[in-house]
Image (tube, rainbow, N blue to C red):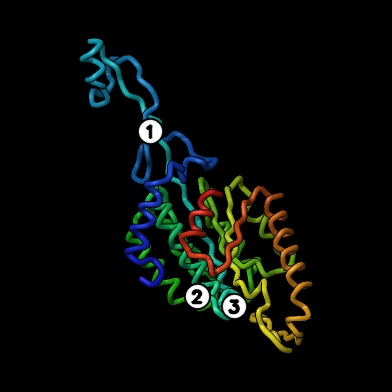
Amino acid sequence: MKYLTPAAVARIKALKNRTSFSLGGTLEGRHETALKKGSSQEFSQYRQYAKGDETRFVDWKVYARKERLFIKEFTRQSAVKFNIVLDASRSMAFKGPGSPETKWDYAARLALYLACLFIAAGDYAGITAVSGDGLARFKPSNDLAALKEMDAGLAALRPSGLSLPAEKLKGAAAAMGGNSAAVLFSDLLVETERLKYLAGLFSSGRRRTYIFQPLDRAELDLPWDGCSAFSDMETGEEVVLAPAAARAAYRLEFSGWLKRAAVAFSASGIRSFTAFTDAPPFVSLEKFIKLL
């Protein structure tokens, strides 16, 4: 696989085993239900045995000490569906000088890392990529073997079209269903009104939502010299400027935009995280997990 190598899977499983964080258990919507495949159960309490109780739940060690029959009761919890949505617009194909990979490859890699982590924790994970060509959907699964198809699908996809098209996002959100959570990967390079629409769309229905924003360091630093022509990857619009002369003002405005975006999401109860593509993927993964 391109993104999710066997070494990465082993490391993700070890990461899951080292943390006391319960991925699904923090989500609103977890509830007691009949035990089924994909569910987990935790010991709740003892109660005295009553006629008709299943003897397989008798604690025989307690009986040996007290000569009385007690039944173990468990809280049964349904698995949560994590819906991972990837912005596959043309701007996600950007790769600045010295960057290890494009924003798209960085996002796809981390999306699969998260999917692997969620499934290893006993929950479901699915991926939807939103591009100019439409939606590429990989339905939620609790089987690690499904990650192979997701990896192949994302590896074959080429970013295209405009960022975060409203109708396609609306369709992706509508397909998520109940007892679910959403994780959106996008560089969020859209106007403020689109960000507000996005926040409202994904925060509806009491769905827990997280946003992971991958950016290239060059988008913040403008590392080029001389007079350069910069072309919008999605619209083709060009602007000519001298990066050295504009760098200080540009960095100030870009940093301000990042803060405004974070505020827009937090106002809707959405937690967001920004990471540059020069950060090691597992470093970003561990920091992002702390948001969950």
- The amino acid beneath tag 2 is Pro
Ranked by sequence position, the earlier of labels 1 and 2 is 1
Disc 1 or disc 2, which is closer to the eye?
2
Residue 71, image x and y in percent? 30, 20
Residue drawn at x 50%, y 78% is 158
Residue at mark 1: 42
- The amino acid beneath tag 3 is Arg
Ranked by sequence position, the earlier of labels 1 and 3 is 1
Figure check: 290 above or below 47: below
Residue at mark 3: 90
Q: Quadrant of the N terminus?
A: bottom left
Q: Which mark is residue 100?
A: 2
Q: Give the spatial CA distance, label 3 vs label 2.
A: 18 Å
Ranked by sequence position, the earlier of labels 3 and 2 is 3
Residue 95 relative to residue 77: left or right:
right
Residue 177, image x and y in percent? 52, 51
Q: Give the spatial CA distance, label 1 vs label 3.
A: 46 Å
Q: Is residue 160 visible?
A: no
Residue neighbourhood size for the residue with mark 3, other residues' Cα within 10 Å, grouped as few (<14), some (14–19), many (≥20): many
Residue drawn at x 43%, y 60% is 113
Q: Secondary structure at mark 3?
A: helix
Q: Which mark is residue 84?
A: none
Residue 191 relative to residue 70: left or right:
right
Q: Is residue 270 visible?
A: yes
Contact between marks 1 and 3 (CB within 8 A): the answer is: no
Figure check: 42 above or below 155: above
* Most foreground residue, 152 or 205: 152
